[in-house]
Image (tube, rainbow, N blue to C red):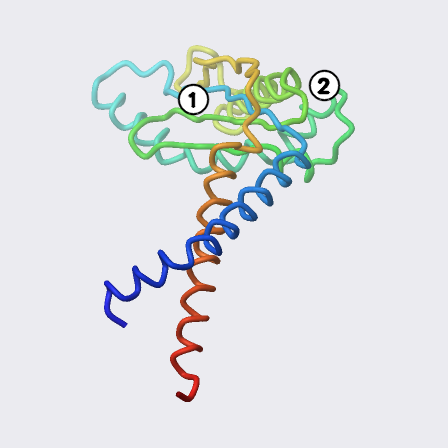
Amino acid sequence: MELRTYVGVLVRNWLLILVAVVVGLAAAGAVILLSTPRYSSTAKILFSATQVETGQDLAYAGTYVQSRMQTYKGLATSPAVLDEVIDQLDLDLTHGELARQISVETSQIDTLIGITAESRDRKEAAKIADSVAAQLIGTVAGVENPGAAASEPGVRGVIVGDADVIDSPSSPDVAVDLLAGLLLGAFVGVGAVTVRHLLRDLEPA
């Protein structure tokens, strides 16, 4: 089918495509209305080496801390951290349920960790993110510096960004969901028109 012919087919069947788009938007709207709003909040931690005197030792210590970031990321959602958070905030959640509400981001170029917590309550999301960050710092200190004196080399975590209470829900994302509904409706509409036209061409004259 030539492009000009195909465009002509779509133009002649614009009403069917429009109906499909409207149905797609309506479906997306229904999903948005039925979804429970959830809020996200992020706390940031900077990990660094402490009590390092020479430049050579500092470079080595920095490389070491960078190499340990994936370990710290895993610790953030471990029972050692989350069980303490559940007790501290008196959450009616299991370790596994809380872990599913938390995402952890690390970078390959620095030693920052972002801990994002999600909850139906905006204030609770911020409290969880801050609590996980504080517990992670303590857990890392216990793993990396067991029994070490404050004057000895080690690894230290510092919260460099407290979790803010965000008023806008992170999900559902109205704009993204409506766009997805529009595109899906348009795809279905164009597909239906195309299939109908091809079937018509196959009919015996």
**Residue type beneath disc 1:** Val
Depth check: give the residue in front, 70 or 175: 175
Q: Quadrant of the N terminus?
A: bottom left
In the rendered image, residue 196, in percent from the top left (x then y), is placed at 45, 71
Extreme residue in the front direction: 205
- Which is more N-terminal, label 2 or label 1? 2
As drawn, 145 above or below 34: above
User: In the image, which disc is placed on residue 89?
Assistant: 2
Q: Quadrant of the C terminus?
A: bottom left
As drawn, 4 above or below 28: below
Q: Residue at x 62, y 28 (%)?
A: 38
Depth check: give the residue in front, 138 or 115: 115
Left or right: residue 173 compared with residue 90: left
**Residue type beneath disc 2:** Leu
Instruction: Kindly report which numbered mark, 1 or 2, lies closer to the viewer in this rendering.
Output: 2
As drawn, 183 above or below 199: above
Q: How many marks?
A: 2
In the rendered image, residue 131, in percent from the top left (x then y), is placed at 61, 19
Q: Quadrant of residue 26?
A: top right
User: In the image, which disc is placed on residue 111?
Assistant: none
In the rendered image, residue 109, in percent from the top left (x then y), is placed at 29, 30
Density class for disc 1 (Cα within 10 Å; few <14, some 14-19, many ≥20) is many
Quick one: SS at disc 2? helix
Quick one: SS at disc 1? strand
In the rendered image, residue 101, in percent from the top left (x then y), is placed at 62, 33
Q: CA distance from mark 1 to mark 2?
A: 27 Å
Q: Residue at x 32, y 34 (%)?
A: 108
Q: Residue at x 59, y 23 (%)?
A: 132
| Residue that label 1 marks | 155
Q: Residue at x 26, y 23 (%)?
A: 57
